Amino acid sequence: MFCYLCRKHNVANTKNKSKKFNVEAAVRFKKKAVEDHANSQQHKDAIAAELLSRVSTFHEEIERKEKTKDDVYHNTFTAMYWLAKEEIANKKFTSLLELLEQLGLKDMRFFQHRSAGSLREMFLLLGKVVRDTVGNTVADVTRFGLLSDEVNDVSNKEQLVTFIKFVNPATGKPNTKFLAASDLLETSTSANARR
């Protein structure tokens, strides 16, 4: 007779490396022989391997999620930055992530922070990083120009938009970068200058 689990997981006796009940059939047809095998380390190892294989899909999923966490966040913020650069509505971000999943980035399904509040925080963080990068570059510049103008956003709210133009010290080429958007009516009742 053979043991189904011992054959399935190809385990051997830990002491003498024999494969009774696995490759070699057991020939002692006694209840005591079966009980001894059931209590042996070989059979316990087979049971442990079986239990591990049953939960391994969940375990593998958790391990894969941990292993790919950095790549998923990198891909997510890269997609978010692309949306901002191409001036595409922030609302399209979740559908862009779904498209990336369909195109083969299956690990994007691990990114679960898709609520409006989470997305808003990520866009604000991305904006802060871009602003700090521009600020660090401009810190080394001796001369620059500012362009400020009043514009209305989609909700007809008056904003002061500011751009900075400077010669990049690293490349020697002129750059124009977005610097800030400020709420004009935060501290005053009108966007008009006093005459």
Image: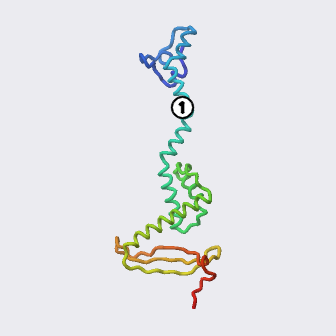
Residue situated furthest bottom in the rendering: 195
Q: Amino acid at mark 1?
A: Ser
Residue situated furthest right in the rendering: 155
Whether 156 is drawn above or below 28: the answer is below
In this rendering, would 11 be left or right of 92?
Answer: left
Whether 31 is drawn above or below 66: the answer is above
The residue under the point 55% across, 29% down is: 51
* Quadrant in the picture for the N terminus: top right
The residue under the point 62% across, 83% down is: 190
Q: How many numbered circles are shown?
A: 1
User: Looking at the image, what colour scheme do you see?
Assistant: rainbow
Quadrant of the image occupied by residue 50 = top right
Residue under pointer 1? 53
Quadrant of the image occupied by residue 182 = bottom right
Label 1: few (<14), some (14–19) or many (≥20) C-alpha neighbours in 10 Å:
few
* Quadrant in the picture for the C terminus: bottom right
Q: Position of residue 13 (x, y in %)?
A: 45, 18
Q: Nearer the viewer, residue 182 or 34?
A: 182
Q: Position of residue 6 (x, y in %)?
A: 51, 21
